[in-house]
Image (tube, rainbow, N blue to C red):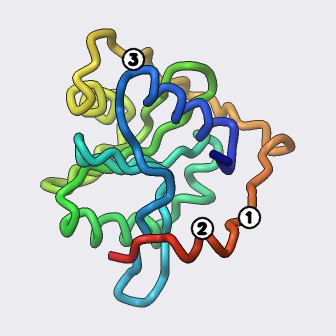
Amino acid sequence: MPFRSENEKRFASWLKRNGFIYQYEKLQFVSKRGRTYTPDFYIDEQKVIIEIKPLSLIPKEFDQGKRRIVEEQLKKYQSMFFIVDMPANTPEVYKAFDGYSDWLDTPDKAKALFEKIFNLSTPLPSPRSQPNANLERIRYRPTTQDERDNLSFA
């Protein structure tokens, strides 16, 4: 399966190694104003939506507009939402949105919720506080027409 980034590919491998079944870019959120957003992963069994984003790109690419779309849509899906990076073989969790409460913007709270939801026997390491993305190396793969045709609209 072609992924848009190496981090997404590593996260998919982590999910598979840990026995989690996922769907890649199968949900598409549409805001009340018609703005769309397609998160990277959906794990049905845990009711979790994951966005893979290097720490250095979160402020630029996960703006207030995307936050509002997530807030609107998660109440419908009754899901949890996480922003995760995958710089190596272990996820680093930076932010979470609990559809029943609010944003958990501190990495420690987000990581604790991630560990609880995924019932991890080994705790994840604490996320790094330094940006880890080499912007020169990030290349996004364009969406194909077939992929666009197969997106689910909420």
Q: Residue at x 27, y 11 (%)?
A: 121
N-term-proximal mark, 1 vs 2: 1
Quadrant containing the N terminus in the rendered view: top right
Q: What is the distance, in whole Å, between disc 2 and disc 3 at their CAs?
A: 32 Å
Q: Residue furthest bottom?
A: 33
> What secondary structure is found at the residue carrying circle 1?
loop
* Horizontal side of residue 81 vs 58, given as left or right: left
Q: For the residue carrying disc 1, how many other residues have a C-alpha within 10 Å: few (<14), some (14-19), or many (20+)?
A: few
Q: Residue furthest top?
A: 122
Question: Where does label 3 land, which residue?
Answer: 124
Q: Residue furthest left?
A: 100
* Horizontal side of residue 95 vs 47, given as left or right: right
Residue 5's disc number? none
**Residue type at tag 1:** Pro
Give the mark toward the camera: 1 or 2. 2
* Horizontal side of residue 22 vs 98, given as left or right: right
Residue 2 location, x and y as percent? 67, 48
Q: For the residue carrying disc 3, how many other residues have a C-alpha within 10 Å: few (<14), some (14-19), or many (20+)?
A: some
Q: Residue at x 43, y 50 (%)?
A: 23
Question: Where does label 2 land, which residue?
Answer: 147
Q: Residue at x 55, y 24 (%)?
A: 128
**Residue type at tag 3:** Leu
The picture quadrant where one finds residue 89 is top right
> What secondary structure is found at the residue carrying circle 3?
loop
Q: What is the distance, in whole Å, between disc 1 and disc 2 at their CAs?
A: 10 Å
Residue 147 location, x and y as percent? 60, 67
Q: Compared to 10, does 97 lie above or below?
A: below
Residue 44 location, x and y as percent? 27, 48
N-term-proximal mark, 3 vs 1: 3
* Horizontal side of residue 109 vs 143, given as left or right: left
Q: Compared to 124, does 1 lie above or below?
A: below
> What secondary structure is found at the residue carrying circle 2?
helix
